[in-house]
Image: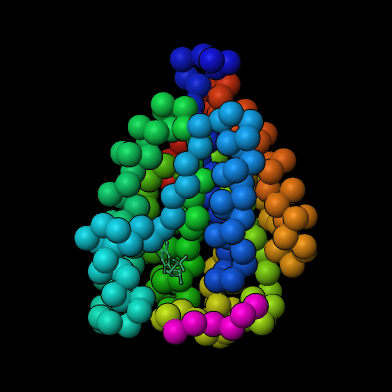
Amino acid sequence: SIGNNDSRGALIVLEGLDRCGKTSQSSRLLSYLDSFGHSVELLRFPDRSTNVGQMISAYLSKQSHLNDHTIHLLFSANRWEKRSMMETKLKAGTTLIVDRYSYSGVAYSFAKGIDIEWCKAPEIGLLAPDLVLYLDIPPEKAAERGGYGDERYDHLEFQKKVAQCFQILCDSSWKIIDACQAMEDVEKQLQETALDRVITCQKGKPLSFLWR
Ligand code: FDM
């Protein structure tokens, strides 16, 4: 292999509002990195397949009711239950493309009126992404895309608050991409930045943790 002993995969997170195109761009990015022969896997949060994930799924589809703090902690627990698997894969050289992460966790709960520092606290110690790709779209534009479904957070006013919180959380390690561009142009921008970061991690960038 090209790397040294500290060579590892990159943790690449895609974030953004509902309907920003995260999910399709995640799988396109996977094929792209895969075509270079990189070991790469896709994850998404919430991961609805676990016990915790099933509680989250029932909540999102309004089949169950939980108070705002409780569901916040379940979303966080859902990341904690995947943490060691993620670390193992990264250290084995696999790049992880993750559709939503702690930033969604904080932004959606903050939008309900929960204190931001409280929202961030349970995320402390989770693996920090090597790159956050933020697919930037005005909430009004996102709403026009095929309309909202019937899940809990599918409301324009709520999405506006979520967008505000993403702005607060954004730092210099984020790459903001205009998600209103043609799909192919969005895709190209993601590719360049992601490939660059994969190579940096291959060279042995140490893992870091939330929140710096
Ligand atoms: N969501 C997602 C949260 O509220 N907190 C979180 O920690 C995460 C990961 O769950 F509305 C919200 C965001 C979205 C909903 O997400 C389900 P998907 O991407 O539609 O499955």
Q: Is residue 178 left or right of residue 156?
A: right
Q: Is residue 187 left or right of residue 122?
A: right
| Of the pair 43 and 65, the residue shown nearer to us | 43
Residue at 44% from the left image edge and 84% from the top image edge:
150
Q: Is residue 197 visible?
A: no
Residue at 57% from the left image edge and 52% from the top image edge:
26
- Residue 73 locus on image (x, y percent): 29, 63
- Residue 61 locus on image (x, y percent): 35, 79
Q: Write the start and end of the magenta stretch as one range.
A: 145-150
Query: How many badges with numbers are in the image?
Result: 0
- The answer to which quarter of the image holds residue 195 is top right
> Most prominent secondary structure in the magenta stretch?
loop
| Residue sitting at the far left | 51
Residue 148 on the magenta segment? yes
Residue 96 on the magenta segment? no
| Of the pair 173 and 147, the residue shown nearer to us | 147
Residue at 65% from the left image edge and 78% from the top image edge:
145
Placement of 196 over or under 120, stated as above or below: above
- Residue 115 locus on image (x, y percent): 41, 70
- Residue 183 locus on image (x, y percent): 72, 60
Placement of 141 over or under 25, stated as above or below: below
